[in-house]
Image (tube, rainbow, N blue to C red):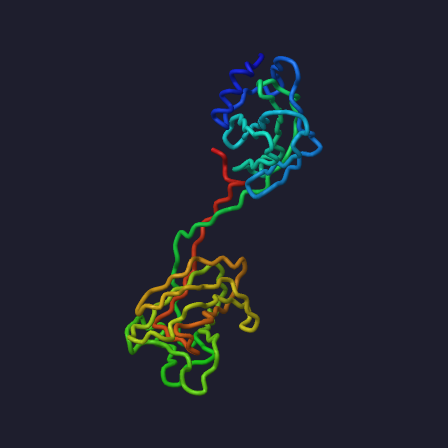
Amino acid sequence: MKLNIKHMIAAFTFLGMVGCDKNFEEFDIVGGGAPAAVELSTVIPEALPGQIKLSWKAPEGDYAYMQIRYYDPLQKKNVCKIASKGTTEMLIENTRARFGDYTFYLQTFNAAHEAGTVQELKARSGAMPASYTEKSRAQVSLTVDQLSCNYPDASEGYFDRLIDGKTADPSFFHTNWHSPQVDLPHYIQIDLKEEHENFAFEYYKRDTGNSDGFPTSAELQISTDGEHWETVSTLTGLPTTRQTKYASDFVMPGKKFKYFRFNVLTSSQNKKYFHIGEIAFFDADIEKYDPETVPLD
């Protein structure tokens, strides 16, 4: 079967992307002087996450545009894209590593829509990244003996107030504000006693008329032994309004741990302490969606 290039190319130019005929090998070359072809040796494919980038050197001779044709196994259809003269790269989106080689057919055309030689190129996609969704979070019950702090205040650093279910004064926890003060960071540490992995952290701001000492940035840190620590999330722009709940996004550290720290780096009005009304630690149930393995149907 022969394709009517004059009519088909006009449609391609109008749409920019269309499905292609299943027969990639047959192209009708009409008229004299064929357009300059892209040198296949200059075409460089690059595997990107869920994408294929094609780069090439523009032909030195005359041509008007180039078709890039391929079969998309995800959409289960033929696709044709148009690269205008002078264009030297194109990004093929929503591809998958699972499909192996994609076969591309490159063909230039002149202003009279006369077709040049079809050139074949094979390229692979990088893997499309997986996505994660939090299905639920379950609060972990804490006791006073599991809590500690590097600089608790002598008169207002009572750990039971962090887990008594109350957020209004006088139920709050304060790190040291008496002289001599020690620069931040100050932390609240939890000995979880058993291994945890995916988690979330929540806390309530103290219910007070004071505007100083609210955490404004902090690190969520984990440890397997209570000695060596790793920061798995950094929180910034934390709220500074009274009795406000803050809930972190879920954190996936990729490893199990037994110790956790809420490590406060800065507080409102640049104070060398922080105060907090209530804390809660949660196990997070995370669902993974992997485009590279999910059944296509």
Quarter where residue 4 is shown: top right
Q: Where residue 168 appears, x then y in whole percent? A: 28, 73
Circle count:
0
Which residue does the image show at 36% across and 65% down from the upper left? 239
The N terminus lies in quadrant:
top right
Which residue does the image show at 65% across and 22% down from the upper left? 35
Comparing 146 with 218, the one in front is 218
Q: Where residue 14 appears, x then y in whole percent? A: 48, 24
Whether 154 is drawn above or below 101: the answer is below
Q: Where residue 48 appears, x then y in whole percent? A: 59, 42
Which residue does the image show at 33% across and 74% down from the upper left? 211
Q: Where residue 187 appears, x then y in whole percent? A: 46, 74
Comparing 170 with 141, the one in front is 170
Whether 213 is drawn above or below 17: the answer is below
Whether 169 is drawn above or below 74: the answer is below
Quarter where residue 238 is shown: bottom left
